[in-house]
Amino acid sequence: AVDRQEELGDRNFRLQGEVVQDSVREEPTGTFFSVVHNDVVVDVDHVGSSPTLFQPGIPVVLEGHWNGESFKSDRILVKHSEVYEADNPDRVDDYGTES
């Protein structure tokens, strides 16, 4: 997405990365932080509330668009690892399975 920034313009898309340690700054207007993926760091300006599980060091998927050199996000999805699922089976939704 960084290499295709000009091509993507202001269209919405999803961006994934891990929240960089010591980068999260809460403001009245939203949350500012950075994510890293494949050694590429992107600054994020998130509007709205962050999920309860949001914290540095976790993988996230962001929905939004480029805003200059930063990514303007309006949705944060926290990616659950297998470790989280094993430790918290009551919190993981059985989406897509039939009873």
Image (cartoon, helix red, strand yellow):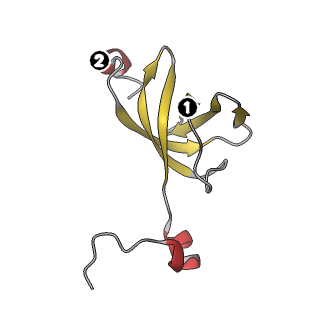
Q: Check the image and report above or below for 31 versus 61.
A: above
Say which mark, if any, is on residue 47.
Answer: 1
| Residue 63 x, y percent position in the rendering | 42, 37
Label at residue 7: 2
Q: Position of residue 21 (x, y in %)?
A: 70, 43
Q: Nearer the viewer, residue 13 or 52?
A: 52
Q: Mark 1: few, some, or many residues within 10 Å (few <14, many ≥20)?
A: some
Give the Cα separation between the discs numbered 2 and 1.
Answer: 23 Å
The spot of residue 61 in percent (x, y) is 45, 45
* SS of the residue under disc 1: loop
Q: Nearer the viewer, mark 2 or mark 1?
A: 1
Q: Residue type at mark 2?
A: Glu
Q: Quadrant of the N terminus?
A: top left
Residue neighbourhood size for the residue with mark 2, other residues' Cα within 10 Å, grouped as few (<14), some (14–19), many (≥20) = few
Q: Residue at x 51, y 73 (%)?
A: 85
- Residue 55 vertical placement versus 67 (above, below): below
Rendered position, 47 above or below 75: above
Q: Residue at x 38, y 20 (%)?
A: 5
Q: Is residue 98 above or below residue 46?
A: below
Picture quadrant where residue 12 is located: top left
For mark 2, give the secondary structure: helix
Residue occupying image coordinates x 72% and y 34%: 25
Figure quadrant of residue 98: bottom left
Name, please, the residue furthest toward the bottom: 99
**x, y (%) of residue 96?**
27, 70
Q: Amino acid at mark 1?
A: Val
Looking at the image, is mark 2 or mark 1 earlier in the sequence? 2
